[in-house]
Image (cartoon, rainbow, N blue to C red):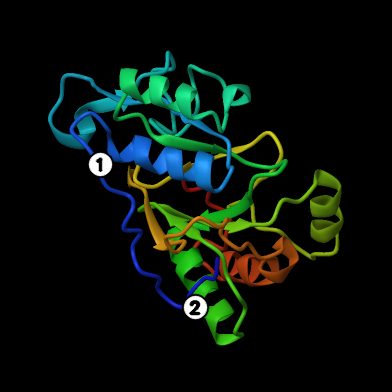
Amino acid sequence: MREILGRRRRLRFWRKKGPAQSAQLEAALVCATEWRWPVLPGAVLTSAGGRGDRGRRCACPDPECVVPGAHPFDPAILAATTDERMLRWWWANRPAAPVVLATGGGAPCAVSLPAVAGARALAALDRMDVRLGPVVATPTRWSLLVAPYSLEQLGELLFAKDCVPSSLRFHGEGGYLVLPPSETGAGQVRWERAPLPGSATPWLPRVEAVVDALVEASTNAPDGGSKLSY
């Protein structure tokens, strides 16, 4: 599958195919059955008795959850699968559950940074004609999907840097990332750069091709890249 530089078209297959199938399930099935990316349902948002978004909280037991609706809970991340029957059973019981990708292994890894820095980094990478893969966006953070990397590879890469802003996050083996069209406490999850519809697995860049631009964009952010924005 080829990507389009610049803003990609929205995925047309992120839609309902029937009254009993949610957009989240449809997205999970594409990830698992077409791309072979293991996914699972995340914690849902529930009403806390208030009005609007301020009245919504995470369904997990932590009343102070800082990433409501944006993490695995039940089942745990190790349950992520590409099995279609399991996915249909999960989302039949929780149709609004966010789609959580288990990163690493044979699945994509990711690097995420605050949204303002993310927009700057993508603009810089476009100017350098760097080939990019899918990019996931929330109102607060952008995440670039990259080819799988090991902790050893990442450690060697970051060791060579003078400074790595604490606002950068690396989603590798054992990690996770919420995918569109999920909704979390931070807002709607969407594709800033979407994979094209098709049966092939989306192309992914190597992490070393993008990390310099991400570090620079985070360092030059208004807060110096030190603020950890969820």
Work out which quarter of the rendered image holds the N terminus and state it.
Answer: bottom right
For disc 2, the marked residue is: 5
CA distance separating discs 2 and 1: 29 Å
Report if residue 202 is visible in the image.
Answer: yes
Residue at 58 percent across and 36 percent down: it is 38
Closer to the chain start, of discs 2 and 1, is: 2
Given contact means CB atoms under 8 Å apart, are the residues at marks 2 and 1 in contact?
Answer: no
Report crowding for label 2: few under 14, some 14 to 19, many 20 or more residues within 10 A (C-alpha).
Answer: few
Where is residue 50, by image quadrant?
A: top left
Image coordinates of residue 200 in percent, x first then y, are 55, 57
What crowding class fits label 1: few (fewer than 14 Cα within 10 Å), some (14-19), or many (20 or more)? Answer: few
Three-letter amino acid code at the position of disc 1: Lys
Rendering quarter of residue 87 = top left
* Residue 169 shows in the view: no
Q: Amino acid at mark 2?
A: Leu
The residue at the far top in this view is 61
Q: Percent position (x, y) of residue 46?
A: 27, 22
Q: Find the residue positioned furthest to the left.
A: 51
Q: Nearer the viewer, mark 2 or mark 1?
A: 1
Name the side, left or right, on which 53 lies relative to 124.
Answer: left
> Which quarter of the picture shows residue 184?
top left
Of helix, strand and loop, which one carries label 2? Answer: loop
Residue of label 1: 17
Q: Secondary structure at mark 1?
A: loop
* Residue nearest the observer in this picture, 220 or 127: 127
Position of residue 104 measured from the top left corner of the image (x, y, whole percent): 69, 42
